[in-house]
Amino acid sequence: MLPQALIHNFAYLLRGAEFTLLLSAGSIALSTAIGVGVALLHVFAVAPIRILVELYLFLARGIPLLILLFAMYYMLPYVGIDLQPTIGGILVIGVYYGAFMSQVFRAAILSLPKNQWDAARGLGMRRSLMLEIVIFPQAFRIAAAPFVNTCMQLIKSTSLVSIIGLWELTMAGRETVERTLAPFQIFAGVALIYFCLCYSLAAYGRQLEKRMRYVH
Amino acid sequence: MPLDVNFILRNLPLFWKGLVVTVELSLLAIGLALVWGLVVAFARMSPRWPLRTAAAAYIELVRDTPVLVQMYFIYFGFSMAGLGLTGFVSGLLALSLQNGGYIAEIYRAGIESVSVKQVEGGKALGMSYWDVMSLVVLPQALVRVIPPLANQFIVVIKDTSLVSAIAVAELTQIGKLLTERTAASYEVFLTIAVIYLIMTGIVSGLSRLAEHRFAIYY
């Protein structure tokens, strides 16, 4: 017995997956930019700013993403901000995951041995130059594997925007189920597409990790 | 926009009702996931390859798909098959199955972090495999996995908000309904965010306490 409903609607699901990829790419770019910036602030900034960073991390770690998405959906219109839903979704997911990304980059920066800093300072480098040619090239390599892991979490989290009515893979799945009444098949197909996306990323991350171990 | 404190106070009983469901779901899910994770972890480390491969495949499968899709799969799938599970049970199953996979890997990392010499020492004393495991390895491994387990617990608490999508009247769903009825979105989401922060804060506080408490013993 072939899963007819799934076969007939697979193209539709793939179109949903396209949107999932778009959302993911946008939020990964945003969260990476935020992550690097916040990690630098966390490591170098003066105490008051560091406290603000801690507060941001505390909030992101303790509040469910769905609550923030709902808040965006229900609250912003009252304040008079009318965001396009896709942009809003990317913004919320990007800012939320920026906190987790910043932890990845911060850990990588702090994991570098102290003599790297001392040597760079001993050569008379300014901080910006030191970061650019000594710290970042090494830290980014260390951060690569956990970065990929966080990206995977982010891709899975984009499924939540379907709850606030954005059309992507999970939403496409729900629509198809309502049309075909074949929930097992369709959601298995949806899960399969997510699995392919995440598993390939995870495999890539493991490869990066292995390469890292080889370098050291 | 001024904050209407009275509105929050007036609706506290409603928030409380949602909170109770969220706490129940979180505790049950983490409890099941802790037990199920141990089973999966031992299967994953089994000397028999079919068991080992099956466990590894299971872990990949539940970790590489969104828990929301797993919830939909269980909730809509079983109801269509005529075995209607309630939203609560479907959510509980999905959360336990997914986090069981994550927790299995946490256990495995903890168990493998215990030195081989400990195992050899136990064997040299004539202990059986299960004696070595339960008396030597697990007590040490469990202390080491307290922080990552607490982290996973926090993830579970946050993920219980997703069952609002399958019609369970927990905290998030209550908040959503209240917002749609009263348009007091500011007050509602602030209250809910604070409640979640308190819950996750309690877990990370307890984890730090437990770490200290057992570090002395260890």
Image (cartoon, grey):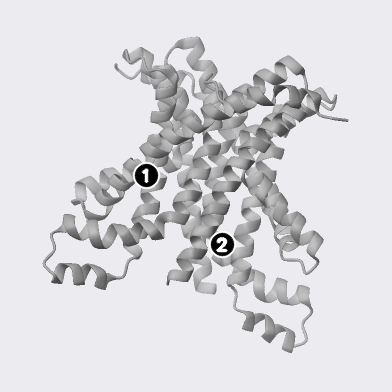
Label 1 environment density (alpha carbons within 10 Å; few <14, some 14–19, many ≥20): some
Q: Chain of mark 2?
A: B
In the drawing, does residue A125 fall left or right of residue B159? left
Instruction: Say which element carries label 1.
Output: helix
Residue sitting at x 81%, y 66%: B48
Residue sitting at x 77%, y 29%: A184
Q: Is residue B146 above or below residue B160?
A: below
Quadrant of the frame with the N terminus of chain B: top left
Q: Chain of mark 1?
A: A
Q: Position of residue B152 (x, y in %)?
A: 56, 49
- Residue type at numbered disc 2: Val
Q: CA distance from mark 2 to mark 1?
A: 22 Å
Residue at numbered disc 2: B145
Q: Position of residue A168 (x, y in %)?
A: 55, 25
Residue B146 sits in which quadrant? Answer: bottom right
In the drawing, does residue A41 fall left or right of residue B162? left
Residue at numbered disc 1: A57
